Amino acid sequence: MEGGNGEELAVGCVLSLRTTLGDEIEGQIIAYDRPSNILVIQEGSSKAGPRRNIRLLKANYIQDFTYLRKAEDPIDPNKCYIDLAGLQAREEASLRQAEIEAERIGVGVTSEAQSIFDALSKTLPVHWDKTVIVVMNEVRVSSPYLPENVIGGTPAANDRVKKVLDFERKRLQVRGPG
């Protein structure tokens, strides 16, 4: 990449640029990957404290830019701050969320059974016990997931599950296969 005044734009240059989407960004180049044509920009000033915004920008999306100045090394390890505890907390939360989502997917069940499970889960607490849908930890719905396959629980809970099950089956029939 070359600047408008002929200077080589390199790590450390501070630019003011406008993207083809109309965003205006001012920041320091901290890296440029030529094969992917991606510019890594640290937004704001270096006096902003230990936390900074980093933006990855495909160079094709730069409409125009102004070279402002050359600044000190942006990757000085003495001035970098990485919140490891925050990163680890985000990683753990993402893993927990992925596990929760994985538990909602039935193993060895039809797409119709999964649709019924998903419909029940919108209003009631449900989980899988192999191929049986367990609702409110007491009502069990087994294959072929018809109202007559609902067992257990209080009569009110049983009736509620049968009602949702019947409604979802009708909805699936109207929607048709696929």
Image (cartoon, rainbow, N blue to C red):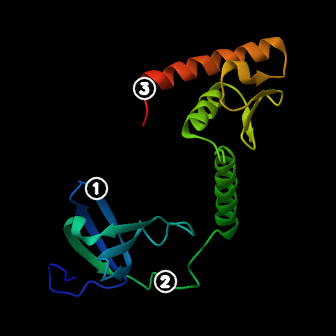
Look at discs 3 and 2 and give the one toward the viewer: 3
Mark on residue 175? 3
In screen coordinates, is 150 left or right of 19?
right
- From what the image shows, is residue 45 above or below residue 173? below
Q: Between 67 and 36, which is closer to the camera in this rendering?
A: 36
Q: Is residue 41 left or right of residue 3?
A: right
Q: Secondary structure at mark 3?
A: helix
> Badge 3 local density, few (<14 within 10 Å), some, or many (20+)?
few
Quarter where residue 57 is shown: bottom left
Instruction: Quickly name the residue at label 1.
Output: 23
**87 shown above or below 9:** above
| Mark 1 neighbour class, 10 Å CA radius: few under 14, some 14 to 19, many 20 or more | few
Seen in the picture, residue 95 relative to 39 is either above or below; the reply is above
Reading the image, the residue beneath label 2 is 75
- Of mark 3 and mark 2, the one earlier in the sequence is 2
Q: Secondary structure at mark 1?
A: loop
Q: Quadrant of residue 81?
A: bottom right
Q: Hey, what amino acid is under mark 3?
A: Arg
Instruction: Look at the numbered discs 1 and 3 and tell me whether their residues touch, using CB distance below 8 Å.
Output: no
